[in-house]
Image (cartoon, helix red, strand yellow):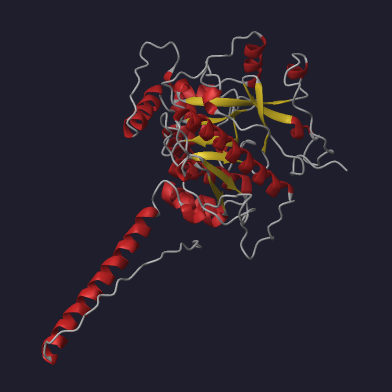
């Protein structure tokens, strides 16, 4: 397994034996003792650094595979730490996660060379830059109010996962999935497994390399969903009648976010989660059952009923029913994890960060919705949008017809409340060919 090397600098202090009037035998004896002490100290120093490297490999951030793109430095060299706790309370770590068949922003010698004009590479760089500037703006605003300065701990980390990186994180998250990942021929299925494993282990914000950021999403500003699984058209009705706004309360904690498509299931091009989230753990278990053909044996009855609207037949790898392993199993995991599990997990996060726990026993909202936020995918050309005159400030993307469809993929967008945050496909990607 390929691993990226980390530079470790060790300083060795040499002990000066000095000059004395001891006879040669005494001097030789003490020289031997000093030599042994020096060897012992050197050994302890080496042991300390060995332990430090081993421990750090299991920390929440694996910096050996994190590269932050910065304008003022070499495009893919600098690594910066990130914090998983904000000044206000627990938050999703500022880790931007991507996966592709090779690392677009830091390719190996055997991969195509770095090309900032490649549509997918340019899109990834755009995502990184927009989120870097957005988070900096948030920090600067907070620091101005508090008369303090941001530290490097609050800057963003980028984790671009190659196939080897996926193998490493899957082995940590759910080793039994490794044989299925290794045998899998479809790249999108492999990416489904990898992103869930990465988010479970380390948390962060996952983006497909072809999802285009219009505006960085602030999860704290998204409306709270009333139902466990809603759909874009219901949300558009809420907007039309002015009933969609039920904003995040000060004590609420956002621990998970994704996009729901027009079929009412998860569109995993965008995912965000805190580390070790119960929904991610359950999704890993369901993906394993998907490959073993045992999903129907472990899915709760209520989840089966809800998912029947999407697929009457429970999918498996032998009978995928046109459904990817990721979207179905993650939606099933969301439905299967109980409100109590979500609340207990959120309270544990609060206790770890020395923040107060919250009792929602008197709240009319279901607890699961307090801790999750959703965007919704719909086409800008849909009559549900045009008849309501919504999102007029978001232009249609120019494109040519795709051999994979009629090209309308270019103008699917992800919205939350009254804002559009992403185009589902960037122009120049497989589903959205560039015009001309």
Residue 99 at least partly seen: yes
Total marks shown come to: 0
Pick the residue in front: 408 or 54. Answer: 54
The image shows residue 135, relative to residue 307, as above or below, that is below
Residue ranking furthest to the right: 436
The image shows residue 79, relative to residue 268, as above or below, that is below
* Horizontal side of residue 2 vs 99, given as left or right: left
Q: Give the percent coordinates (x, y) of residue 172.
A: 42, 50
Q: Give the percent coordinates (x, y) of residue 37.
A: 20, 74
Residue ranking furthest to the top: 241
Pick the residue in front: 285 or 33. Answer: 33
* Horizontal side of residue 379 vs 222, given as left or right: right
Pick the residue in front: 364 or 284. Answer: 364
Residue 329 at least partly seen: no
Q: What residue is at 62 percent from the left and 49 percent from the top?
A: 187
Q: Give the percent coordinates (x, y) of residue 281.
A: 43, 38
Quarter residue 214 falls in: top right
Quarter residue 261 falls in: top right
Q: Give the percent coordinates (x, y) of residue 146.
A: 45, 30
The image shows residue 202, relative to residue 15, as above or below, that is above
Q: Quadrant of the C terminus?
A: top right
Q: What residue is at 26 percent from the left and 67 percent from the top?
A: 44
């Amino acid at each position: 397994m390929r691993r990226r090397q980390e530079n470790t600098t060790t300083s060795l202090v040499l002990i000066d034996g000095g000059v004395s009037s001891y006879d040669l035998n005494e001097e030789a004896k003490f020289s031997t003792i000093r030599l042994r002490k020096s060897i012992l100290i050197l050994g302890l120093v080496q042991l300390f650094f060995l332990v430090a490297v081993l421990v750090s490999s299991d920390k929440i951030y694996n910096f050996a595979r994190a590269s932050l793109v910065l304008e003022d430095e070499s495009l893919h060299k600098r690594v910066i730490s990130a914090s998983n706790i904000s000044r206000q309370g627990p938050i999703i770590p500022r880790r931007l996660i991507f996966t592709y068949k090779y690392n677009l922003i830091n390719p190996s010698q055997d991969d195509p060379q770095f090309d900032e004009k490649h549509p997918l590479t340019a899109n990834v760089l755009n995502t990184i830059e927009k989120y870097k500037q957005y988070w900096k703006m948030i920090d600067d605003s907070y620091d101005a109010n508090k008369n303090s300065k941001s530290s490097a701990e609050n800057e963003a980390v980028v984790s671009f996962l190659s196939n080897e990186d996926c193998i490493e994180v899957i082995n940590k998250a759910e080793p039994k999935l490794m044989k299925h990942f290794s045998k899998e021929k479809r790249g999108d299925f492999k990416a489904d497994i990898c992103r869930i494993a990465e988010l479970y282990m380390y948390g962060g914000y996952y983006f497909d390399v072809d999802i285009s950021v219009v505006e960085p999403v602030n999860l704290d500003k998204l409306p709270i969903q009333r139902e466990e699984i809603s759909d874009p058209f219901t949300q558009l009705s809420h907007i039309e009648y002015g009933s969609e706004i039920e904003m995040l309360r000060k004590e609420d904690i956002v621990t998970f976010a994704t996009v729901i498509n027009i079929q009412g299931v998860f569109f995993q091009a965008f995912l965000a989660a805190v580390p070790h989230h119960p929904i991610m753990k359950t999704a890993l278990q369901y993906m394993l059952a998907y490959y073993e053909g045992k999903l129907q044996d472990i899915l709760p009855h209520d989840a089966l009923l809800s998912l029947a609207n999407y697929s009457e037949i429970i999918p498996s790898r032998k009978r995928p029913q046109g459904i990817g392993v990721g979207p179905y199993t993650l939606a099933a995991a969301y439905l299967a994890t109980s409100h109590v599990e979500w609340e207990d997990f959120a309270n544990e996060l609060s206790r770890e960060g020395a923040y107060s726990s919250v009792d929602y026993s008197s709240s009319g909202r279901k607890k699961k919705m307090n801790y999750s936020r959703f965007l919704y995918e719909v086409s800008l050309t849909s009559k549900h949008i045009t008849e309501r005159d919504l999102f007029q400030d978001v232009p249609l993307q120019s494109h040519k017809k795709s051999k994979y469809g009629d090209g309308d993929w270019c103008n699917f967008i992800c919205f939350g409340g009254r804002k559009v945050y992403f185009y589902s496909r960037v122009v120049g990607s497989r589903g959205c060919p560039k015009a001309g």
